[in-house]
Amino acid sequence: DPCVKTLFIGKKIIYLPTCHSTNDIAAELVRKENLSEGTLVITDSQTAGRGQRGASWVTSQGQNFTFSLILRPTFLAPGEQFLLSQAISLGVRDFVSSITEDIQIKWPNDLYINDFKLGGILIESTWQGARMAHAVVGIGLNINQTHFESSIGSVTKGTPQRATSLRLETGQCFELAAQLPHLLQALEHTYLRLRGGRYEAIRNDYQSALLGYGEKRLFRGKDGRIFEGTVTGVTALGKLCIRHADGVQLEYDIKEVEWLWP
Ligand code: BTN
């Protein structure tokens, strides 16, 4: 699409018909070569796709977006990785919302449509002193797969997650090559906002896209106790704020709270 222009994201694209994991390949390239920021490693199928927290990521051959983007967010300090994951999830959200409005972000950075998982993000970074050196931003987004079951097309580790795809949601089949520039453009747009230091604006947009925002839902705390609470937002560094039934608002990091939905 000649109308879609990016400055640096996707200027260099490394396409592999199949590979173990684009995140692993990208990390290897970062170690060996001085790759320019915005380089993309993209594949049709992975034999060892990885998700967050040790989960695996299984994608239907050639049906979905499966790629890793190499960035150099040297403006980020330790503890600030959430800022990047927030910007990237917003970028993916913006792309999907041009196709369907039902898209939401499940904290910290999963993409959901009507409580079904559409995609996930796995960011792995390297550091140099007190600055991030490289970030490998892995994105898996279900586009044309026709399975609802997560054993094909999403994350699993014991518990299958309910998955969906843009095709299942809209009834349309999408041409991946035609959609890719739009996704890259959306990613570049939010990344440039981040680089420009527009942290508050990004956080506001992220919060308004948050699944369960302002709604009462069930959670399980670290101590195993189940409680009802309302998601009231995220902190600047990415903790989830939940207001408990007694009115007390607490902040949780990823290891401290489990969502009992969807
Ligand atoms: C998650 O939801 O847990 C994150 C899933 C991230 C999957 C993508 S697919 C491209 C890249 N390569 C990987 O091995 N994982 C990421």
Image (cartoon, helix red, strand yellow):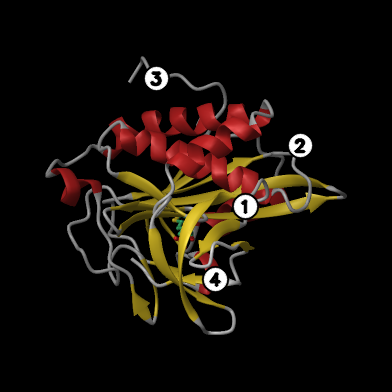
Which mark sits nearer the N-terminus, 4 or 3?
3
Q: What element carries label 4?
A: strand
Q: Is mark 1 on a helix, strand or loop?
A: loop
Task: Determine contact: label 2, label 4, CB under 8 Å.
Answer: no
Disc 3 marks which residue?
4
* Residue 75 tag number: 2
Q: Residue at x 22, y 49 (%)?
A: 144
Q: Nearer the viewer, residue 6 or 239?
A: 239
Which mark sits nearer the N-terminus, 1 or 2?
2
Q: Which of 29 and 246 is in front in this view?
A: 246
Q: Residue at x 29, y 68 (%)?
A: 150
Residue 32 percent across, percent down from the top left: 71, 50
Q: Is mark 2 on a helix, strand or loop?
A: loop
Alpha carbon of mark 1 to alpha carbon of mark 3: how far?
31 Å
- Mark 1 vs mark 2, foreground winner is 1
Q: Nearer the viewer, residue 245 or 42?
A: 245
Disc 4 marks which residue?
257
- Mark 4 vs mark 3, foreground winner is 4
Q: On the picture, is 221 further left or further right than 42?
A: right
**Identity of the amino acid at label 1?**
Gly
Which mark sits nearer the N-terminus, 2 or 4?
2
* Residue 238 tag number: 1
Mark 4 is surrounded, within 10 Å at the Cα level, by few (under 14), some (14 to 19) or many (20 or more) other residues, namely: some
Which mark sits nearer the N-terminus, 1 or 4?
1
**Identity of the amino acid at label 4?**
Val
Q: Which residue is drawn at 61% across and 43% down?
A: 84
